[in-house]
Image (cartoon, rainbow, N blue to C red):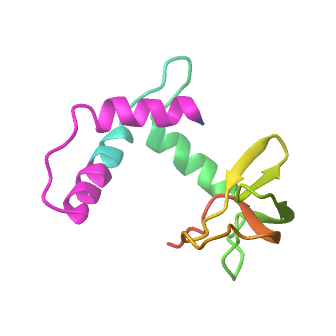
Amino acid sequence: MESLVKYVRLNALVPVPEVRSRDELNARLRQWCESEKEHTVSGTEGTVGCRWTTEQAALPPLPPHPFDCARVAFVKVNRYAQVNYETCVHSVPWGGQRHPPRGRAALPIGLPRLHS
């Protein structure tokens, strides 16, 4: 996944596009994505668009409701307003009250929910 992000960044966003709005940036990115359909990846047969059409036919339908791409973990908040989850330490926003929050917190881990 990281190599794909790097590829898109280097090929679509470097140099940084000069745009007036997010909509204009999205339009440029969509145009770039459409042009990538004609690209052929070395070591493969067919264009990206042709291979996507083939893969798309084999994909199952989307579920009828949005999928929440996160795990909820109940973790203990330490005195530094931090929680430990697996091997990471996350800060807990607490708004600058005199004392940081104590107790337990539900921490959604993962990607934000995406909507079409």
Quarter residue 76 falls in:
bottom right
Quarter occupied by the N terminus: top right
Magenta-colored segment: predominant secondary structure: helix
Q: Residue 23 magenta-drawn?
A: yes
Tell me: 77 left or right of 5.
right
The residue under the point 60% across, 64% down is 112
Residue 64 image-quadrant placement? bottom right
2 lies left or right of 74: left
Nearest the viewer among 84 and 54 is 84
Q: How many marks?
A: 0
Q: Is residue 2 above or below residue 77?
A: above
- Taking the spot 70% from the left edge, 59% from the top edge, the residue there is 81
- Residue 17 appears in which quarter of the rendering? top left
Residue 63: x and y, percent?
A: 72, 75
31 to 100, vertically: above or below: above
Q: Is 87 left or right of 42, judged from the image as shown?
A: right
In the image, residue 71 sits, relative to residue 82, either above or below, namely: below
What residue is at 50 percent from the left and 72 percent from the top? 116
Q: Which residue occupies the foreground of this view, 107 or 115?
A: 107
The image shows residue 96 at horizontal and vertical percentages of 54, 69
Report x, y in % for residue 8. Answer: 40, 36
Q: Which residues are magenta?
A: 2-31
Specify whether residue 61 is painted magenta: no
- Furthest toward the front, the residue is 98
Residue drawn where x is 24% and y is 65% of the image? 23
